[in-house]
Image: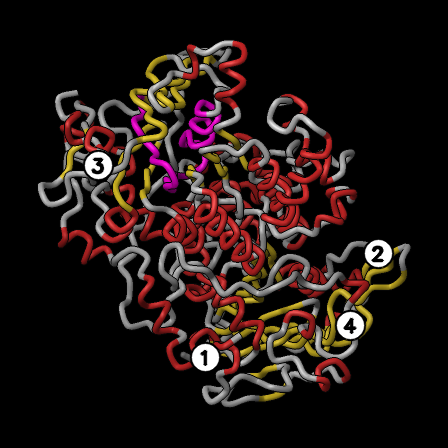
């Protein structure tokens, strides 16, 4: 692509730990007509050491396929993944095993992702059964298990309990401890707090934040909850129908979205703003995401976009950014302007939420 | 409505805005379990007014859905209403026989569930399911009811209703299924609509569409809406008044702006502090320690005592009653937070 120089990965401020270029994944669906489902379409992204990349988008946009491909649970059709310069798909045997250790995952549902027939201790220790050289002695494993349980805020004495004896928040802590067991560099968190109640969600977010500070682990944080992503992410990538349509720092994407879809997403998500000072002109998108089996020609968002013109149907937009924010790119022929954003009502405004509680502070 | 050509949903002349449609007083619901009888809903009172939205806000297991089911008469066989009254438009539903209740409350009360796919019957077409209300309550023929079903589908924004009326639920998207469920709930032009987490399973852009539909329906027919949710931001945007529930009890009620603007119950305050919107990135959220008590371990005294930063001896001994605290507000706390009470900030 001619504008490759403008994509964040080309001029990243941090040395990327994980560098993904042109990642494409098609699924073949049996049935009539066009049976190729393009789940990921030329995805570019990078994650630096100790950094959090937020991945947002609606269901069916390809977030989870991307996560699975990064973990080598799916074989991509095109594109490369570089992990500190090495392509994990070229690895075999011991080297592959060593690589797998470095990328781990935490799943959404803490009730379904833990084996009910194992104890918490067995679940957290299970990775060491495969990666035997990490903690070779029984004593070392026991010590590490205690340490892990303490790190995630569980009592080491509870190692013998089965998952159903724990609350939802505690179960997610077990899932996090299991992901940490192999001392990974990157953890892919697929909706890690969306099954949890608000008060417990805050505890788990605090834990993740604390772990990142202490261990320097990078997160790829997948969530549909924009306020959570705003809180945890350093950078954000917005996905729509298999493509990353906008990326930038969290402030750029949330405060000055360039892609109309991002703007609509921000506008659609409810705000905890009861001051009522700024009535919002909410963008309510028409319809729903088209089927990935039959994506629209040109720009994939054009069927729901209020700014779409003829060119959007004929030419797929490539990533572009403004001179002021070269690392903030959006795939749109008619990016949002400051005036657009004003009339559409602005995205999540954390400042208002502060005002809300001001009398007590 | 005499003929089926008439619009399905019009403003009811017998309803004036802000009139009390539903008044729940001292509602108790007990669940019979092998471990004994559990109190799932305890002494819950609230009212819903025409053209207004009341939010029942709380975390999972707090009894908000159980309250809705009790009001709608849809409790599971193991759960019973053991106390209190549910007065819908002047009639105490608890005093009616099941048959009378069906006849009276059926057309007056609509309910929308969270998961439209399980709430709809997969083996009948949506047209058949939408027609049911007209066939049972208005004794219409299948043909006439189908015409009404098509109208209803158009009314809730389903494109091409004539061709889609014979489709099955799985042939619709999540947002469209939720529209069908809403159509069923408002089919008979009810006074009260209970929406139990109506958008939790949906994406935000679709959620915005569904909430707009509910707002429009509320405005055009003076519906009283009871919105059951765990989402504070949704309450802030959609509701006029809120009742905050914790462990089966209502702990605070009032107009949304006032309750969220200056919460008086420590739990409400804790919930608001847990929203990851008002602190800087990477900063710790003021989460509430611990987790809600299990129903068979609800302590004597205040239900929130085990997690409350203001807890005192009196909280362990006496359960605070829901008492008036300023205009239109109630709170159940011995140490209701006021602007002068800042202890929470230092915890």
Tell me which chain the residue with mark 3 is part of. Answer: A
User: What are the residue bounds of the magenta stretch?
Assistant: A42-70
Towards the viewer: B198 or B298: B298
Name the element at disc 3.
Answer: strand
Mark 1 or mark 2, which is nearer the start of the sequence? Answer: 2
Pointer 3: what residue? A330
Q: Is residue A59 magenta?
A: yes
* Label 1 and label 3 in one chain: no
| Residue at 49%, 47% in the rendered image | A211
The x and y percentages for residue A230 are 36, 51
Q: Which mark is residue A234?
A: none
Q: CA distance from mark 1 to mark 4?
A: 27 Å
The x and y percentages for residue B331 are 59, 82
Asked whether the viewer can see residue B217, the reply is: no
Pointer 1: what residue? B262
Tell me which chain the residue with mark 1 is part of. Answer: B
**Outermost residue toward the left?**
A323
Pointer 4: what residue? B299
Mark 4 or mark 2, which is nearer the start of the sequence? Answer: 2
| Residue at 68%, 75% in the rendered image | B305
| Residue at 73%, 82% in the rendered image | B319
């Amino acid at each position: 692509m001619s504008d490759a120089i403008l994509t964040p990965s080309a001029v990243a401020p941090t040395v990327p730990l994980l560098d993904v270029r042109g990642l494409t994944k098609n699924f073949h669906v049996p049935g009539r007509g066009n049976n190729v489902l393009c789940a990921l379409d030329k995805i570019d992204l990078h994650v630096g050491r100790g950094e959090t990349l937020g991945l947002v988008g609606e269901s069916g946009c390809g977030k989870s396929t991307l996560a699975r491909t990064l973990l080598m649970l799916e074989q991509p059709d095109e594109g490369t993944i570089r992990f500190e310069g090495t392509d994990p798909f070229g690895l075999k045997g011991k080297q592959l095993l060593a690589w797998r250790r470095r990328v781990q995952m935490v799943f959404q549902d803490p009730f379904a992702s833990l084996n009910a027939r194992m104890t918490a201790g067995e679940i957290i220790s299970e990775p060491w059964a495969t990666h035997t050289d990490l903690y070779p002695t029984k004593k070392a494993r026991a010590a590490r298990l205690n340490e892990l349980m303490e790190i995630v805020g569980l009592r080491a004495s509870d190692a013998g309990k089965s998952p159903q004896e724990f609350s939802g928040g505690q179960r997610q802590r077990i899932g996090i401890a299991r992901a940490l067991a192999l001392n990974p560099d990157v953890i892919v968190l697929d909706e890690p707090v969306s099954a949890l109640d608000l008060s417990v969600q805050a505890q788990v977010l605090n834990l993740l934040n604390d772990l990142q500070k202490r261990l320097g682990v990078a997160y790829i944080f997948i969530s549909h909850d924009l306020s959570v992503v705003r809180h945890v992410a350093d950078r954000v990538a917005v996905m729509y129908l298999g493509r990353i349509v906008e990326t930038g720092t969290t402030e750029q994407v949330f405060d000055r979205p360039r892609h109309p879809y991002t703007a609509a997403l921000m506008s659609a998500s409810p705000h905890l703003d009861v001051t009522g000072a700024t009535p919002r002109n909410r963008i309510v998108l028409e319809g729903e995401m088209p089927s990935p089996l039959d994506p629209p020609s040109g720009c994939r968002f054009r069927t729901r976009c209020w700014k779409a013109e003829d060119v959007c149907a004929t030419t797929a937009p490539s990533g572009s950014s403004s001179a002021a924010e070269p690392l903030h790119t959006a795939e749109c022929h008619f990016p949002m302007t400051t005036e657009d954003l004003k009339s559409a009502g602005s995205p999540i405004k954390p400042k208002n939420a502060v005002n809300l509680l001001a009398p007590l502070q | 409505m005499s003929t089926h050509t008439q619009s399905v949903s019009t403003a009811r002349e017998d309803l004036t805005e802000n009139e009390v449609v539903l008044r729940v007083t001292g509602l108790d619901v007990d669940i019979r379990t092998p471990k004994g009888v559990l109190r799932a809903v305890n002494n819950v009172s609230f009212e819903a007014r025409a053209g207004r939205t009341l939010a029942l806000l709380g975390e999972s297991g707090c009894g908000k859905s159980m309250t809705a089911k009790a009001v709608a008469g849809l409790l599971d066989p193991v759960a019973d209403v053991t106390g209190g009254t549910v007065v819908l438009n002047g009639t105490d539903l608890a005093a009616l026989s099941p048959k009378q209740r069906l006849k009276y409350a059926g057309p007056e009360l609509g309910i929308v569930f969270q998961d439209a796919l399980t709430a709809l019957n997969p083996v009948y077409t949506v047209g058949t399911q939408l027609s049911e209300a007209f066939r049972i309550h208005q004794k219409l023929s299948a043909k006439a009811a189908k015409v009404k079903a098509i109208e209803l589908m158009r009314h809730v924004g389903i494109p091409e209703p004539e061709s889609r009326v014979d489709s099955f639920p799985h042939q619709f998207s999540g947002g469209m299924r939720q529209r069908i469920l809403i159509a069923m709930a408002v089919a008979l032009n009810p006074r009260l609509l209970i929406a139990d987490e109506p958008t939790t399973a949906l994406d935000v852009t679709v959620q915005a569409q569904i909430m707009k539909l509910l707002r429009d329906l509320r405005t055009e027919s003076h519906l009283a809406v009871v919105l059951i949710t765990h989402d504070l931001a949704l309450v802030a945007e959609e509701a006029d008044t809120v009742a905050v529930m914790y462990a089966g009890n209502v702990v605070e009620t009032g107009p949304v702006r006032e309750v969220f603007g200056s919460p008086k119950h420590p739990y409400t305050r804790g919930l608001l502090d847990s929203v990851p919107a008002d602190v800087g990135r990477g900063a710790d959220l003021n989460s509430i320690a611990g987790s809600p008590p299990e129903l068979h371990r609800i302590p004597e005294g205040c239900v929130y005592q085990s997690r409350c930063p203001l807890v005192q001896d009196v909280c362990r001994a006496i359960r605070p009653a829901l008492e008036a605290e300023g205009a239109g507000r109630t709170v159940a706390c011995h140490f209701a937070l006021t602007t002068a009470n800042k202890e929470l900030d230092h915890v």
